[in-house]
């Protein structure tokens, strides 16, 4: 398997944080996520990782720098 570059590693670490946050978030917040997913997930451009609620747990999604 090819070695990941720094940007990929940062993004994968961020996805891991999503999983960890989901495990410990209150049930009420999990319900808010589920309610957000219903109208937003499109199977193409929008994913669970786009939920705005993640920011308070793990910060903004990393953006590549040039």
Image (cartoon, grey):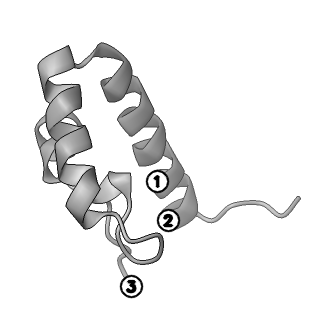
Q: Position of residue 46 (x, y in %)?
A: 34, 69
In the image, 41: left or right of 52? right
Q: Can the viewer see residue 42 in this picture?
A: yes
Label 1 vs label 3, nearer the camera: 1
User: Is the residue under label 2 in contact with that under label 3 (CB below 8 Å)?
Assistant: no
Q: Which residue is mark 1?
A: 10
User: Is the residue under label 2 in contact with that under label 1 (CB below 8 Å)?
Assistant: yes
Residue at horizontal 39 percent and vertical 34 percent from the top: 17
Q: Which residue is mark 3?
A: 66
> Helix, strand, or loop for circle 1?
helix
Label 3 vs label 2, nearer the camera: 2
| 66 in relation to 48, above or below | below
Q: Which mark is residue 7?
A: 2
Disc nearer the start of the sequence (3/2) = 2
Between 2 and 43, the residue placed more toward the observer is 43
Q: Can the viewer see residue 26 in this picture?
A: no
Between 23 and 61, the residue placed more toward the observer is 23
Residue at horizontal 18 percent and vertical 51 percent from the top: 36
User: Mark 3 to mark 2: distance in Å?
Assistant: 10 Å
Q: Position of residue 27 (x, y in %)?
A: 20, 16
Disc nearer the start of the sequence (1/3) = 1
| 34 in relation to 47, above or below | above
Crowding at dot 1, Cα within 10 Å, few <14 / some 14-19 / many 20+, comes out as some
Residue at far bottom of view: 66
Crowding at dot 2, Cα within 10 Å, few <14 / some 14-19 / many 20+, comes out as few
> Helix, strand, or loop for circle 3?
loop
Quarter of the picture containing the C terminus is bottom left
Q: Position of residue 16 (x, y in %)?
A: 48, 37
Quarter of the picture containing the N terminus is bottom right
User: Mark 1 to mark 3: distance in Å?
Assistant: 14 Å
């Amino acid at each position: 398997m090819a070695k990941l570059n720094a940007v990929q590693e940062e993004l994968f670490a961020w996805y891991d944080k999503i999983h960890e946050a989901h495990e410990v978030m209150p049930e009420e917040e999990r319900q808010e996520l589920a309610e957000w997913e219903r109208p937003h997930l499109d199977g193409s451009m929008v994913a669970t990782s786009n939920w705005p609620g993640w920011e308070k747990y793990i910060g903004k999604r990393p953006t590549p720098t040039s």
